Amino acid sequence: PNNMPNPNLKWETTAQADIGVDISLHDRFTIGVDLYNKLTKDLLLSRPLPPTTGFSSIVENIGEMENKGIEVSLGVQQNFGPVEWTSNLNVSVNRNKVLKLYNDQPIDDLGRGSNRVMVGQPIGIFYSYESLGVNPSTGDIVYLDKNFDKSITTDDRTIIGNPQPKFVGGFTNGFSYKSFDLNVFFQFSYGNDVFNGSRLYLESLQGGDNQTTAVLRRWMQPGDITDIPRATNDAVKAGENKRVSSRFIEDGSYLRLKNIALGYNVSKELISKLHLNSLRFY
């Protein structure tokens, strides 16, 4: 047997409350606002078992999570002579929180970025060591000694980032002029942290991995002010250079031109001879 059976398993359940309003003004402006609160119970998770059972874990309904937020959309349609313009902006704000786990025990070390699931926090927070930078005197990376025991241990780990964005959205603009049409779509996210796992290897100054040009600004002599620690053959210090920490946490906010399309609609007089209703090149 690979797993211990649990005859008491049941479906995860979700209860959600929504309230919304849609407003149209002069057939040109539209406004939509939606508020929601979503509670998910009986989440399926593995909890640890004593090794004497012959198994390491069992799947049970032991988690609860909350998502609540607001979604806003704004639309406009306007004509400028022969040019017709339509635009829509939507923004979504979601706040996620883990409410319950087995005995409130966090689920630790998920993924390369040391993500964690813990009660009272958004799901998947980055939980590891806080980097204080490079010591200008020694060139060694310095980490926060949270419990002041003069030693960096797992007890010094803390929340160093949140992968959940503060808000996300999209912005669409459409233009039409006679037989031509143009559509431009932007997508954006703001306030989310990302863990750059590539830098963990490409800026650690050790191993067989190639390094980025960032290591050219590494510490080389006392007094150097830099964010890249010294190169060393000391196994302990080299390991410190590669420690998962806030050093590799970056701002994941972005604005992306997701799609742009230019089209031409062939007139019905021209395509009627081909027995077509419409023909568009884009």
Image (spheres, rainbow, N blue to C red):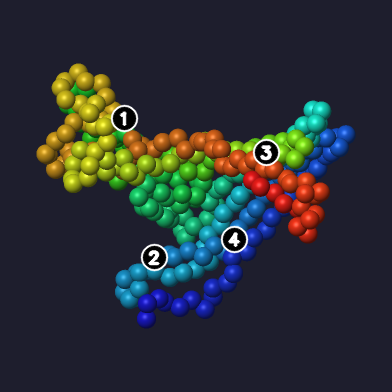
Closest to the camera, between mark 1 and mark 3, is: 3
Asked if marks 4 and 3 touch (Cβ < 8 Å), the reply is: no
Badge 1 marks a residue whose secondary structure is strand
Looking at the rendered structure, the kind of residue marked 3 is Leu
Looking at the rendered structure, the kind of residue marked 2 is Pro
Which residue is painted at 64% across and 46% down in the image?
282
Closest to the camera, between mark 3 and mark 2, is: 3
In the picture, the quarter occupied by the N terminus is: bottom left
Looking at the rendered structure, the kind of residue marked 1 is Leu
Q: Earlier in the sequence, mark 2 or mark 4?
A: 4
Crowdedness near tag 4: few (<14), some (14–19) or many (≥20) residues, C-alpha within 10 Å = some
Spatial separation of the CA atoms under disc 4 and disc 3: 45 Å
Q: Which residue is mark 2?
A: 48
Q: Which residue is mark 1?
A: 132
Spatial separation of the CA atoms under disc 2 and disc 4: 20 Å
Badge 3 marks a residue whose secondary structure is strand
What is the residue that sits farthest to the left in this orientation? 233
Which residue is painted at 67% across and 58% down in the image?
15
Asked if marks 2 and 4 touch (Cβ < 8 Å), the reply is: no
The image quarter containing residue 196 is top left
Closest to the camera, between mark 1 and mark 4, is: 1
In front of the other: 78 or 137: 78
Q: Which residue is mark 3?
A: 182
Q: Earlier in the sequence, mark 3 or mark 2?
A: 2
Spatial separation of the CA atoms under disc 1 and disc 3: 49 Å
Say which mark, if any, is on residue 41: 4
